[in-house]
Amino acid sequence: MLEAYAQLARRVRAAPARLGRTRLVAVDGPSGAGKSWFTARLADALAELPGGARPPVVHTDDLLDGWDDQLTFWSRLEECVLAPVREGRPGAYRRYSWVRRDFLPRPVPVPVAPVLLVEGVSAARAAAVPDLSLAVFVTAPPELRLTRAVARDGPGILPELRRWHTGERAHFAADGTEERADLVVDGAPDLPHDRSRYYLRRGGPGKAGIRCRS
Protein backbone atom coordinates (compact mmCIF):
# COMPACT_ATOMS: atom_id res chain seq x y z
CA MET A 1 0.00 0.00 0.00
CA LEU A 2 1.33 3.43 -0.96
CA GLU A 3 1.39 5.91 1.90
CA ALA A 4 2.37 9.56 1.98
CA TYR A 5 5.43 10.77 3.87
CA ALA A 6 3.30 13.72 5.02
CA GLN A 7 0.86 11.35 6.70
CA LEU A 8 3.66 9.47 8.42
CA ALA A 9 5.21 12.74 9.57
CA ARG A 10 1.94 13.71 11.25
CA ARG A 11 1.80 10.33 12.99
CA VAL A 12 5.35 10.76 14.24
CA ARG A 13 4.59 14.20 15.64
CA ALA A 14 1.48 12.81 17.37
CA ALA A 15 3.34 9.86 18.90
CA PRO A 16 4.44 9.97 22.54
CA ALA A 17 8.00 11.17 23.20
CA ARG A 18 10.10 8.46 24.85
CA LEU A 19 13.64 9.84 24.61
CA GLY A 20 13.05 12.56 27.15
CA ARG A 21 10.98 15.17 25.30
CA THR A 22 12.10 13.83 21.91
CA ARG A 23 10.40 11.36 19.57
CA LEU A 24 13.12 8.99 18.44
CA VAL A 25 12.58 7.38 15.02
CA ALA A 26 14.96 4.56 14.05
CA VAL A 27 15.25 3.62 10.37
CA ASP A 28 16.85 0.18 10.18
CA GLY A 29 17.37 -2.46 7.51
CA PRO A 30 20.18 -4.08 5.52
CA SER A 31 22.74 -2.06 3.58
CA GLY A 32 21.57 -0.74 0.22
CA ALA A 33 17.88 -1.17 1.04
CA GLY A 34 17.06 2.55 0.78
CA LYS A 35 17.24 3.67 4.41
CA SER A 36 18.98 6.97 3.69
CA TRP A 37 16.47 7.88 0.99
CA PHE A 38 13.51 7.09 3.23
CA THR A 39 15.02 9.02 6.15
CA ALA A 40 15.68 12.10 4.02
CA ARG A 41 12.13 12.12 2.65
CA LEU A 42 10.64 11.71 6.14
CA ALA A 43 12.84 14.56 7.41
CA ASP A 44 11.56 16.73 4.54
CA ALA A 45 7.96 15.88 5.42
CA LEU A 46 8.51 16.69 9.10
CA ALA A 47 10.01 20.05 8.12
CA GLU A 48 6.91 20.85 6.06
CA LEU A 49 4.47 20.40 8.93
CA PRO A 50 2.95 23.60 10.36
CA GLY A 51 5.44 25.05 12.80
CA GLY A 52 7.85 22.27 11.93
CA ALA A 53 11.58 22.28 11.40
CA ARG A 54 13.88 19.75 9.82
CA PRO A 55 14.82 17.23 12.51
CA PRO A 56 18.41 16.28 13.24
CA VAL A 57 19.50 13.07 11.51
CA VAL A 58 22.25 10.77 12.80
CA HIS A 59 23.65 8.16 10.39
CA THR A 60 25.17 5.26 12.28
CA ASP A 61 27.81 4.83 9.55
CA ASP A 62 29.27 8.11 10.82
CA LEU A 63 29.80 6.56 14.26
CA LEU A 64 31.50 3.33 13.19
CA ASP A 65 35.19 2.92 13.88
CA GLY A 66 35.66 1.17 10.53
CA TRP A 67 34.22 -2.06 9.13
CA ASP A 68 34.87 -4.10 12.27
CA ASP A 69 32.64 -1.78 14.37
CA GLN A 70 29.47 -2.89 12.59
CA LEU A 71 27.42 -3.51 15.74
CA THR A 72 29.70 -2.46 18.61
CA PHE A 73 29.37 1.28 18.03
CA TRP A 74 26.21 1.46 20.15
CA SER A 75 27.87 2.65 23.35
CA ARG A 76 29.23 5.61 21.39
CA LEU A 77 25.74 6.51 20.15
CA GLU A 78 24.30 6.12 23.65
CA GLU A 79 26.95 8.18 25.39
CA CYS A 80 27.30 10.97 22.82
CA VAL A 81 23.75 11.34 21.51
CA LEU A 82 20.97 9.40 23.20
CA ALA A 83 21.89 9.97 26.86
CA PRO A 84 22.25 13.77 26.57
CA VAL A 85 19.05 14.16 24.53
CA ARG A 86 17.20 11.93 26.99
CA GLU A 87 18.24 14.37 29.71
CA GLY A 88 17.19 17.41 27.69
CA ARG A 89 20.75 18.38 26.71
CA PRO A 90 22.22 18.64 23.21
CA GLY A 91 24.49 15.82 22.16
CA ALA A 92 27.51 15.76 19.86
CA TYR A 93 29.62 13.12 18.16
CA ARG A 94 32.73 12.93 16.02
CA ARG A 95 32.14 11.72 12.47
CA TYR A 96 34.27 8.86 11.20
CA SER A 97 36.13 9.49 7.94
CA TRP A 98 36.17 6.36 5.81
CA VAL A 99 38.93 7.98 3.72
CA ARG A 100 41.24 8.90 6.62
CA ARG A 101 40.14 5.87 8.66
CA ASP A 102 39.87 7.99 11.76
CA PHE A 103 37.37 10.20 13.56
CA LEU A 104 37.38 13.84 12.53
CA PRO A 105 38.24 16.35 15.28
CA ARG A 106 35.26 18.67 14.87
CA PRO A 107 32.16 17.47 16.77
CA VAL A 108 28.79 17.25 15.01
CA PRO A 109 26.11 18.82 17.22
CA VAL A 110 22.78 17.07 17.84
CA PRO A 111 20.25 19.56 19.23
CA VAL A 112 17.31 18.65 21.43
CA ALA A 113 14.36 18.66 19.04
CA PRO A 114 10.81 17.30 18.91
CA VAL A 115 12.02 14.49 16.61
CA LEU A 116 15.39 12.78 16.18
CA LEU A 117 16.01 10.41 13.26
CA VAL A 118 18.68 7.71 13.61
CA GLU A 119 19.39 5.78 10.40
CA GLY A 120 21.54 2.74 9.84
CA VAL A 121 22.02 -0.98 10.31
CA SER A 122 20.89 -1.97 13.84
CA ALA A 123 19.42 1.48 14.61
CA ALA A 124 16.19 -0.18 15.80
CA ARG A 125 17.91 -2.94 17.79
CA ALA A 126 16.22 -4.30 20.90
CA ALA A 127 18.30 -2.04 23.16
CA ALA A 128 16.66 1.02 21.56
CA VAL A 129 13.05 -0.10 22.08
CA PRO A 130 12.35 1.77 25.37
CA ASP A 131 13.32 5.08 23.71
CA LEU A 132 11.60 4.59 20.34
CA SER A 133 8.48 6.34 19.17
CA LEU A 134 8.70 4.58 15.80
CA ALA A 135 10.81 1.71 14.43
CA VAL A 136 11.07 1.45 10.63
CA PHE A 137 12.61 -1.46 8.73
CA VAL A 138 13.45 -0.93 5.03
CA THR A 139 13.90 -3.99 2.81
CA ALA A 140 15.05 -4.76 -0.76
CA PRO A 141 16.26 -7.85 -2.67
CA PRO A 142 19.89 -8.83 -1.91
CA GLU A 143 21.02 -8.58 -5.54
CA LEU A 144 19.71 -5.04 -5.87
CA ARG A 145 21.20 -3.99 -2.57
CA LEU A 146 24.61 -5.28 -3.64
CA THR A 147 24.36 -3.45 -6.98
CA ARG A 148 23.44 -0.20 -5.24
CA ALA A 149 26.34 -0.45 -2.81
CA VAL A 150 28.90 -1.17 -5.52
CA ALA A 151 27.55 1.66 -7.68
CA ARG A 152 27.87 4.02 -4.72
CA ASP A 153 31.25 2.96 -3.31
CA GLY A 154 32.99 1.01 -6.07
CA PRO A 155 33.86 -2.68 -6.50
CA GLY A 156 36.81 -2.40 -4.14
CA ILE A 157 34.48 -2.69 -1.16
CA LEU A 158 33.16 -6.13 -2.17
CA PRO A 159 35.26 -8.25 0.24
CA GLU A 160 34.32 -6.10 3.23
CA LEU A 161 30.75 -5.71 2.02
CA ARG A 162 30.17 -9.45 1.81
CA ARG A 163 31.48 -9.82 5.35
CA TRP A 164 29.19 -6.97 6.39
CA HIS A 165 26.17 -8.68 4.80
CA THR A 166 26.91 -11.85 6.76
CA GLY A 167 27.07 -9.86 9.98
CA GLU A 168 23.85 -7.97 9.40
CA ARG A 169 21.93 -11.14 8.48
CA ALA A 170 23.04 -12.77 11.72
CA HIS A 171 22.13 -9.66 13.71
CA PHE A 172 18.65 -9.27 12.24
CA ALA A 173 17.90 -12.97 12.78
CA ALA A 174 18.97 -12.82 16.43
CA ASP A 175 17.43 -9.43 17.16
CA GLY A 176 14.08 -9.98 15.40
CA THR A 177 14.19 -6.39 14.17
CA GLU A 178 11.89 -6.72 11.18
CA GLU A 179 9.26 -8.68 13.08
CA ARG A 180 9.25 -6.06 15.86
CA ALA A 181 9.21 -3.00 13.59
CA ASP A 182 6.22 -0.65 13.58
CA LEU A 183 6.57 -0.10 9.85
CA VAL A 184 8.16 -2.26 7.13
CA VAL A 185 8.94 -0.38 3.92
CA ASP A 186 9.65 -1.82 0.47
CA GLY A 187 12.86 -0.15 -0.67
CA ALA A 188 12.49 -1.46 -4.24
CA PRO A 189 8.83 -1.03 -5.17
CA ASP A 190 7.76 -1.73 -8.75
CA LEU A 191 4.58 0.36 -8.48
CA PRO A 192 4.66 3.70 -10.32
CA HIS A 193 4.65 6.53 -7.80
CA ASP A 194 6.30 9.80 -6.83
CA ARG A 195 9.19 8.64 -4.63
CA SER A 196 9.57 12.08 -3.09
CA ARG A 197 6.01 11.97 -1.72
CA TYR A 198 5.07 8.32 -1.22
CA TYR A 199 6.59 5.07 0.01
CA LEU A 200 5.31 1.52 -0.26
CA ARG A 201 4.39 -0.10 3.02
CA ARG A 202 4.95 -3.82 2.95
CA GLY A 203 2.12 -5.84 4.50
CA GLY A 204 2.40 -8.83 6.74
CA PRO A 205 1.40 -10.10 10.17
CA GLY A 206 0.99 -7.22 12.57
CA LYS A 207 1.74 -4.67 9.85
CA ALA A 208 -1.80 -3.50 9.12
CA GLY A 209 -0.87 0.00 10.19
CA ILE A 210 1.59 2.14 12.12
CA ARG A 211 1.72 1.04 15.74
CA CYS A 212 3.25 4.12 17.34
CA ARG A 213 3.65 3.03 20.94
CA SER A 214 1.43 4.61 23.57
Image (cartoon, helix red, strand yellow):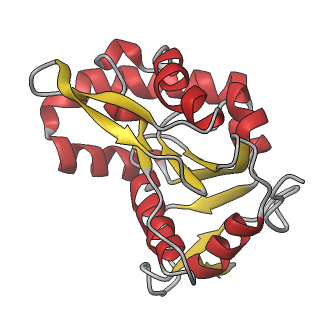
The residue lying at 35 percent from left, 26 percent from top is 162
* Left or right: 116 as drawn, with respect to 125: left
Check the image and report above or below for 23 versus 67.
below
Total marks shown come to: 0
Inspect this view and state whether residue 122 appears: no
Q: Nearer the viewer, residue 195 or 24?
A: 24
Q: Quadrant of the C terminus?
A: bottom right
Residue 68 lies in what quarter of the image? top left
Residue 148, horizontal then vertical, whole percent: 29, 51
On screen, residue 120 versus residue 206, left or right, reads: left
Name the residue: 85% across, 52% down: 213
Q: Nearer the viewer, residue 50 or 102?
A: 50
Q: Check the picture and name the quadrant holding the N terminus.
A: bottom right
The spot of residue 179 in percent (x, y) is 78, 43
Q: Position of residue 175 (x, y in %)?
A: 71, 26
Q: Say left or right for 71 vs 14.
A: left
Nearer the observer, 155 or 95: 95
| Residue 7 appears anywhere in the view | yes
